[in-house]
Image: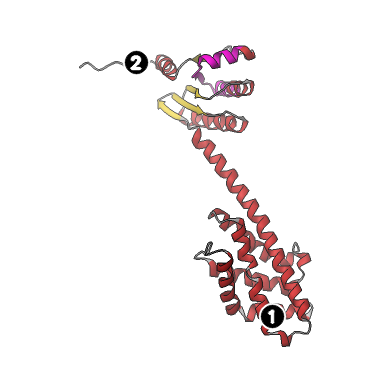
Amino acid sequence: MRQENQRLADLLRDDQDAIVKSWTAEYQANAGGRGVSQTLFGEQMAILKALEAGVRADGNAAGFESTAWTPLRDVLAQLSASRAAQGETADVTSAFVLAIKRPIFEGLQRHRGELESQIEVLWAASAIVDRMAQWTISTYQRSREEIISRQQHELLELSTPVIKLWDGVLAVPVIGTLDSSRAQIVMETLLERLVESGSELAIIDITGVPTVDTLVAQHLMKTVTAIRLMGAESIISGIRPQIAQTIVHLGIDLQGIQTKATLADALSEALRRTGHTVARRAG
């Protein structure tokens, strides 16, 4: 390993206190007072130790994808995922990493008499920190995309609950657009609940679905077919006049699928099928 890289690694080890102190001040100034978490010191020490190990093992920013930098990449990935989960922005997260550059330069300036080639060490340190910031941004974006994807899936599940009305009868109120991904969640959740509850009838209410086109009708028919394969029956309610006209105009065949105009009609049919009656209490 080049002597300059050895001196840089020694600086990261021997001047930790000064680097961390200056790093914190620089970060607070750049972040405008935002993003200073309670775990800041632990994050700084983890990065410093991994950075020192990477410089000693490789010291070349161009080889940042090599195994020598794996500990540092892992630390930065964990940092990015943590900041993304906390709702921190990408620029503040990147600013945290970049804020270490000035403390390193200051440390090298203090020890300039011990270094034979100050410019080369400064350039190497700058290139490494820049590469760290780039890696942090890329991993932050991936973490953020994973969080958004997971939240969207959870929202879809929450927006389409499967409700047990009484023994043997489930209901699925669908509100909003029924696209392919949501239809898949409706089908999977409904089939799972049919198995768990042993229900024989499922009411799919589309009163809250603004429009029914060929794609939506196909999703509904697939769901009904899957329910039948499970040995249960289904009723589609919420067929408003506009939806009925659209279905006829599109030539969609709902033959064999029982439909009702309102959820109340579907509930009445479910009561009849299960042998239940509802009576007004006298007085």
Q: Position of residue 25 (x, y in %)?
A: 56, 72
Q: Is residue 40 magenta?
A: no
How many residues crowd around disc 1 within 10 Å: few (fewer than 14), some, or many (20 or more)?
A: many
Disc 2 to disc 1, C-alpha distance: 86 Å
Residue 277, numbered label: 2
- Which amino acid type is marked by label 1? Leu
Left or right: 192 as drawn, with respect to 5: left
> Seen from this angle, which residue lies furthest bottom?
113
Instruction: Say what amino acid the circle numbered 2 marks.
Output: Thr
Q: Secondary structure at mark 2?
A: loop
What is the x, y in percent for residue 157? 52, 36
Q: Residue 132 lies in what quarter of the image?
A: bottom right
**Rendered-image quadrant of the N terminus:** bottom right
Q: In front here: 109 or 156?
A: 109
First in sequence, mark 2 or 1: give its number: 1
Give the residues drawn in magenta, as a range.
Answer: 222-248
Left or right, 5 with respect to 25, comes to: right
Can residue 115 be seen here? The reply is: yes
The residue located at (55%, 43%) in the rendering is 151
x%, y% of residue 59?
75, 72
- Colouring mode (rainbow / by chain / secondary structure / one colour): secondary structure
Tell me if residue 236 is in the magenta stretch. Answer: yes
> Dot 2 surroundings within 10 Å: few (below 14), some, or many (20 or more)?
few
The residue lying toward the viewer, choosing from 4 and 65, is 4
Residue 110 horizontal/vertical position (percent): 66, 84
Residue 201 vertical position relative to residue 107 in the rendered view, above or below: above
- Do labels 2 and 1 touch, CB within 8 Å? no
**Rendered view: 203 above or below 1:** above
Q: Is residue 159 above or below residue 143?
A: above
In the picture of the structure, the residue carrying the numbered disc 1 is 108
| Residue 78 makes an appearance in the image | no
